[in-house]
Amino acid sequence: MHEKRVVVVTGGASGIGLGISRLFAANGHPVAVLDMQGEALERETALLRDGGATVSAHKVDVSDRAQIDAAYDSIRAAFGPITIVIANAGISIPVPFEDISAEQWQRTIDINLNGVFHTVQAAMPDMLAAKWGRVVTISSQAAQSGSQDRAHYAASKGGVIGLTRSLAREFGGRGITVNTIPPSLVDTPMAREGERSGQVPPLEVIAQHIPVPRPGTPADIAHACEFLCSEKASYITGQEINVNGGSWM
């Protein structure tokens, strides 16, 4: 991408989202980082600014449309129209299916699926006006293969994949591409916390069952996002780009 575009990254202050924020900022794009983690949000955006990046920080719950709209108004005032959205924000709390409460189910859907709807729809007027836009959703291999004790998570991410395909059909003729990346094993603070709590085996043990026998990194996902948001990917839309070391083919 040679032209500088305004980029929104949700869940952009840690893990995969932080890797994406860092790469787009390093490439000179104005990046708006949206996250609920206030301390991490301020710390990481300050570090990016110290490195010369153009970034803004927005503490936002993506399930709340009013918060999204307010953040987008601020982003437009500071940077201009939003034409790249990386919808990454998500939660994953392991619970056996019979123990998932209605509140846990709803909260997972609200963040992981409804949050994508809000963040993408709110930016669509800018993309339509520009006759150019890039949307990348971050789904999950859990939606492709299923996931024990994470039925609510897998269902929400399956909805993200269906939404991605539908938007690709609806907006492909108007200069807007929409793709999804469903990661598998990625070395993030959330994954390491699951390892420490005993919810999952050590990541390096899991990785031995992957054709490329290592955990993925946030940078692996970020580089795929970078490509999908470039002119080189203008004929790619509605696709699941499996950045997973071959764990799902």
Image: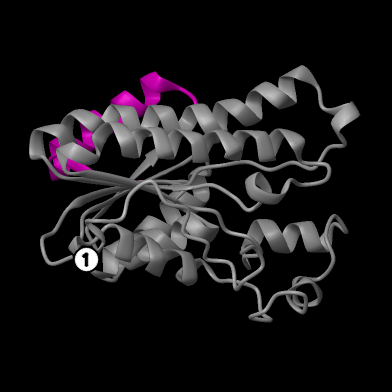
Image coordinates for residue 204, horizontal then vertical, percent: 76, 77
In this picture, is 26 found above or below 40?
below
Query: Could you tell me if residue 61 is visible in this image?
Result: no
Q: Which residue corresponds to the image point at 44% horizontal and 51% vertical from the top-left?
A: 12
Disc 1 is placed on an element classified as: helix
Image coordinates for residue 17, horizontal then vertical, percent: 46, 55
Q: Amino acid at mark 1?
A: Lys
Image coordinates for residue 38, horizontal then vertical, percent: 49, 43
The residue lying toward the viewer, choosing from 213 and 42, is: 213
Question: Is residue 224 found left or right of 191 in the rendered image?
Answer: left
**Image quarter (top left, top right, bottom left or bottom right) of the C terminus:** bottom right
Question: Is residue 178 found left or right of 235 in the rendered image?
Answer: right
**Image quarter (top left, top right, bottom left or bottom right) of the N terminus:** bottom left
Residue 247 is drawn in which quadrant?
Answer: bottom right
**How is this picture coloured?**
one colour
What residue would you read off at disc 1? 232
- Is 82 included in the stretch rendered in magenta? yes
Q: Which residue corresponds to the image point at 24% horizontal and 31% vertical from the top-left?
A: 124
- Is 7 included in the stretch rendered in magenta? no
Image coordinates for residue 128, horizontal then vertical, percent: 15, 33
Q: Which residues are magenta?
A: 62-85
The residue lying toward the viewer, choosing from 67 and 217, is: 217
